[in-house]
């Protein structure tokens, strides 16, 4: 397949798969299931960042400091972007914007809704997030098909718990299940748009591939460390901790295994 076909297929399949899985999880409203997925997603994100995208960025650069500087700037950028979302979405200490477990738990306990306000904010933020994911997927595929596949798997892994949280917030905002699914589906097409746009732009600006891979690493590290790991600390008991560490290691191992399989094929 051509690189563009890979980008479109990965973006479409990733969006549809993550939304369908998220909808199934959300409708069953099992908080424990979501915790399991989050633990695995953390491992997949960290594995893809440290075992695939960062090493590839270093290979494409003659200056390692440039890669690490872009990584540092990227983490700061994602921190600022997240702050912008939180400023517009959170009210005092009650915030569900980036905590899918809290979103599910809150909806189970409280069926009141806010007439669509928080739901619309989530869709706007998620659309932008999906657009950025599309750009990162395209940069990975342009650098190497194997890298693109592994990056897509990691992004899909973290999209499932995120989309589940978004789906629950939409239901809590008064949307019907059908409308919530439709809104999430439309939002996911931003990934395809971002990927296709980046594909045509990066062909004439190849020098952007390396910094985009560094930004992809920054995005995955930031999401894992800032958005997902804090939710695991809400279950400090030893059994939960063992389960979380095991699933994180499983996520890292699966990315490592996937990378080795594609490297030798």
Image (cartoon, helix red, strand yellow):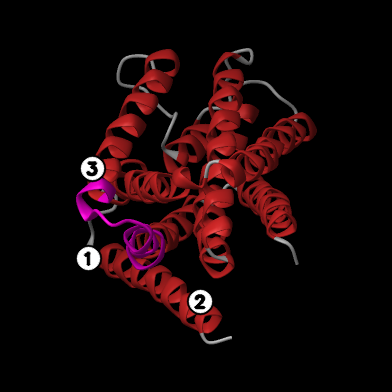
**Residue 12 higher or lower than 43, as above or below:** above
Within 10 angstroms of label 1, few (less than 14), some, or many (20 or more) residues? few
First-in-chain label (1 vs 3): 3
Residue at position x 37%, y 65% from top? 47
Q: Secondary structure at mark 1?
A: helix
Q: Where in the figure is residue 91, as x and y percent of width and height?
A: 37, 14
The residue located at (47%, 33%) in the rendering is 106
Question: What whole-number distance in Å separates the C-alpha atoms at marks 1 and 2?
Answer: 30 Å
Relative height, residue 115 to residue 186 (above, below): above
Which numbered disc, 3 or 2, marks the residue closer to the eye?
Answer: 3
Toward the viewer: 55 or 66?
66
Q: Quadrant of the C terminus?
A: bottom right
Q: Nearer the viewer, residue 191 or 37?
A: 191
Give above or below for 8 relative to 226: below
For label 1, the residue is: 238
Expressed as whole percent of the image width and height from the top left, the position of residue 225 reads 29, 48
* Main SS, magenta residues: helix
Q: Is residue 54 magenta?
A: yes
**Disc 3 marks which residue?**
69
Residue 158 percent coordinates (x, y): 49, 52
What residue sits 23% from the left and 55% below the top? 64
Task: State the residue lying farthest toward the bottom.
Answer: 264
* Magenta highlight range: 50-67
**Residue of label 2:** 258
In three-dimensional space, the C-alpha distance between marks 1 and 3, rounded to whole angstroms, equals 37 Å
Indicate the secondary structure of the residue bearing disc 2: helix
Let me know if residue 171 appears in the view.
Answer: yes
């Amino acid at each position: 397949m051509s690189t563009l076909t890979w980008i479109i297929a990965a973006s479409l399949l990733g969006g549809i798969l993550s939304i369908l899985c998220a909808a199934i999880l959300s409708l069953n409203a099992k908080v424990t299931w979501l915790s399991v997925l989050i633990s695995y997603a953390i491992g997949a994100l960290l594995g893809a960042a440290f075992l695939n995208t960062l090493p590839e960025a270093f290979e494409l650069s003659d200056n390692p400091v440039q890669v690490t500087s872009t990584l540092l700037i990227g983490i700061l950028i994602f921190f600022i972007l997240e702050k912008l979302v939180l400023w517009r979405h959170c009210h005092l200490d009650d915030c569900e914007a980036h905590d899918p477990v809290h979103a599910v738990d809150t909806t189970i306990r409280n069926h009141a809704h806010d007439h669509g306000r928080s739901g619309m904010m989530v869709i706007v933020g998620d659309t932008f997030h999906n657009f950025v994911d599309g750009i990162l997927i395209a940069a990975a595929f342009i650098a190497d098909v194997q890298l693109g596949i592994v990056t897509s798997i990691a992004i899909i892994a973290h999209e499932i718990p995120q989309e589940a949280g978004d789906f629950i917030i939409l239901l809590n905002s008064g949307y019907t299940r059908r409308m919530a699914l439709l809104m999430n589906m439309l939002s996911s097409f931003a990934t395809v748009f971002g990927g296709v746009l980046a594909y045509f732009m990066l062909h004439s600006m190849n020098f952007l591939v390396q910094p985009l891979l560094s930004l992809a690493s920054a995005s995955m590290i930031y999401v894992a460390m800032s958005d997902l790991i804090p939710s695991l600390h809400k279950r400090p008991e030893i059994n939960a901790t063992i389960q979380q560490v095991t699933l994180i290691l499983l996520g890292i191992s699966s990315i490592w295994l996937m990378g080795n399989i594609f490297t030798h094929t």
